[in-house]
Image (spheres, rainbow, N blue to C red):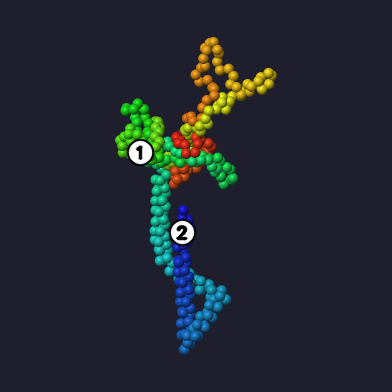
Amino acid sequence: MINFDTYINNFDLPFEDNLNDKETSGNEESISEESSSDESKSEEVTVEDVKSEEILAEDAKSEDPADSAKSEKASEKNVKSDDVPVEDTLPEEVPAKNSSSEKTLDENTSNNKENLNPKFLFSNLIGRKIGMTQLFTDSGDVFPATVVEAGPCTVTQIKNKKSDGYDSIQLGFSDAKEKHLTKSQLGHFLKSKLSPKKVLKEFRYDKNDNLPSIGDEVDLRQFKVGDFVTVTGSSIGKGFAGHMKRHNFGGGRASHGKNSVMRKSGSVGAGTDPGRIFPGMKMAGRMGGEKVTVKNLEVISIDLSKNLIFIKGAVPGSNKNYLYITKN
């Protein structure tokens, strides 16, 4: 931002110099008038005598209050008479430069608004988890944050109720090589005339007129600091685990005649009726690698230049895992 006071003060210096020059010229004119009156009295006056008289006149003005008052009145008259063109130039030059500076500031702000305000509203993104870090405030508070490289995502398909039975927009993230895709996948991207993408994800939407079209890019401009988002991803796979670790069971009693039952699951069903284990019974098995959704996570920082979003807290999945972000 340009400080208006300093901007104006830059133009005051040459005008003050002009005023000082005019004051000195006015003083020299008054001195020349006195010297001319002295010449009328004396018949022959040399140049050295004039200089000595000017020096004596300046000393006399500094000593005599009456002469100083007269010189001040004369200088004020000269300044008033000479101030007319200076006052005329001030409103012509300063507002012209000031108006140009205001235009540049307005243009910059408008450009920034255009860069910050997206053309459409669709607050969903596909990203990749980078890792976790800490962010500090000026007061010294620390916040754990997950760094996610979110977007830019390309709109690859738009579905509606007439053709597909529901409204959704499909986003593609991260370019892929054609040799790694099947013919059906390549045909899907050729239909929309877009480059192949590694990850595709559909996001439902409500009725909204300001929506992207096929080929548009969705980036972090849809989000801002302070928003709350919902993050969905695949949790870290932990292999085969027992029921206590997998389901947080408490185990059996460790006293009163119990032997080797401390980490057992206990009874899982009757023997005669129904004679089987019900589906969904909590038992030992493969742990992790499941779809997990975490809601109401706060956005604490955004880096548009690097497509990074800093989300407070932890999100599911390991590093380099793909995530789906939706603004609440």
Q: Earlier in the sequence, mark 1 or mark 2?
A: 2
Label 1 sits on a secondary structure element that is: helix
Q: Position of residue 182 (x, y in %)?
A: 35, 34
Label 2 sits on a secondary structure element that is: helix
Q: Position of residue 27 (x, y in %)?
A: 48, 75
Query: Is residue 282 or residue 103 the one in the foreground?
Result: 282
CA–CA distance in space, label 1 to label 2: 61 Å
Residue lying at 58% horizontally and 17% vertically, measured from the top left? 267
Mark 1 sits on what residue?
179
Figure quadrant of residue 64:
bottom right
Query: Is residue 223 or residue 186 the one in the foreground?
Result: 186
Q: Is residue 154 visible?
A: no
Q: Amino acid at mark 1?
A: Lys
Mark 2 sits on what residue?
7
Residue lying at 49% horizontally and 71% vertically, measured from the top left? 73
Q: Residue furthest bottom?
A: 44
Q: Residue furthest right?
A: 256
Q: Position of residue 225 (x, y in %)?
A: 49, 41
Q: Amino acid at mark 2?
A: Tyr
Q: Where is 153 relative to 41, above or below?
A: above
